[in-house]
Amino acid sequence: MSTFNYNDYQNVIAKAQNNTSNNVKVGFFKMKNDKDEALIRINVGSMEDLQFATVHQLGAAQKWMKVGCLNPVGSYSDNCPLCSAVATGNTAIGKASKKVYVQMLVAYKDPMTNQFSAAIPVIWERPAGFAREIANLLRDYGDLRSRVFKVTRNGAAGSMQTTYSISYIPLYDKPEAVSTDFGAFTNFNIAKHSYWEKSVEDINTFLKTGAFPEYVKPAQEGAYVAPTTPVQPAYTAPVQAAPVYQAPVNPTPVAQPVYQAPVTPAPATPAPTPVAQPAAQPAAAPATDRPARNFGGFSF
């Protein structure tokens, strides 16, 4: 089943974090809605247990990250490039603000069931003036690690006028109600959890480029380094030059002989066929009036 309620979610987180303290992830204390409630056990035995820092909050483009101010608390100098940037009108960088970071174990109350979740380790980031509230609790109740308090949010979601009331609840002063195991905070470094510590050079790079230099974690001394396998050069297929299209060259046409119709020779004029001429007859004797005479077969 993919659905679950808030109490289920908190219990899953608590079970995941019930490993050794080195594997427990410390979260942030968050109460979003008016009259939300939570039970807390504060990891403070004296004021020396509180951690303070002066930080700059970067704008939305940097997901509202916080960077530690490089100026000593209560003073200003050009030692902090972020302070200088704010002084010259850079509105994407917040003014240096003083914060106190309170280590706690918290059990959130599910508003639907009124049941409290298992306790998980968190950091409550508050304005430094909240330390006075902690001082008052120490004066009234002594070591706060042995006490359970109820925190109530007074303010709608997103309200900038939100306040928190803290009241002592002896009914829950039992380890099974709110864990007393603060092991998650052993050797805890607030600078690696709640804000970044950057050098002058890194901050100047950020101001010029909008990003911090990438951090490469150095190899731990004496750590095992696996042998590096030689990288075989990747096979690169020979690049075939794309053939350049050549339009076919039409050969110069050979002149075709012009057709000459055969000339029929004019027929030779045949020699005239000789016409047989009758043999010439002897001219007739001129006619006379005298009768013809015949002598010896000849007429005369």
Image (cartoon, helix red, strand yellow):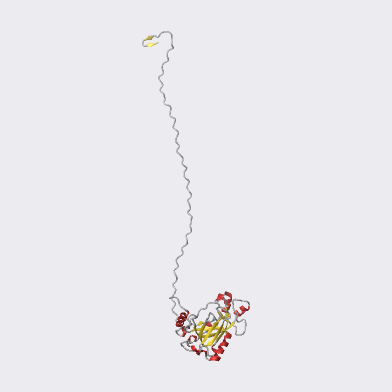
Q: Is residue 222 visible?
A: no
Q: Residue furthest front?
A: 113
Q: Residue furthest top?
A: 290
Along the line of sight, the residue nearer the viewer: 47 or 32: 32
Q: Is residue 232 above or below residue 137?
A: above
Along the line of sight, the residue nearer the viewer: 224 or 282: 224
Residue occupying the point 38% across, 11% down: 298
How many marks do you count on the picture? 0
The percent coordinates of residue 56 (x first, y second) are 58, 80
Q: Quadrant of residue 286?
A: top left
Residue occupying the point 61% across, 78% down: 86
Residue occupying the point 56% across, 89% down: 136
Q: Quadrant for the C terminus, please.
A: top left
Q: Is residue 133 visible?
A: yes
Along the line of sight, the residue nearer the viewer: 106 or 289: 106
Q: Quadrant of residue 135?
A: bottom right
Q: Is residue 6 above or below residue 267?
A: below
Q: Quadrant for the N terminus, please.
A: bottom left
The percent coordinates of residue 126 (x first, y second) are 56, 83
Q: Quadrant of residue 93?
A: bottom right
On screen, residue 295 versus residue 93, left or right, reads left
The percent coordinates of residue 211 (x first, y second) are 55, 75
Q: Residue furthest right?
A: 88
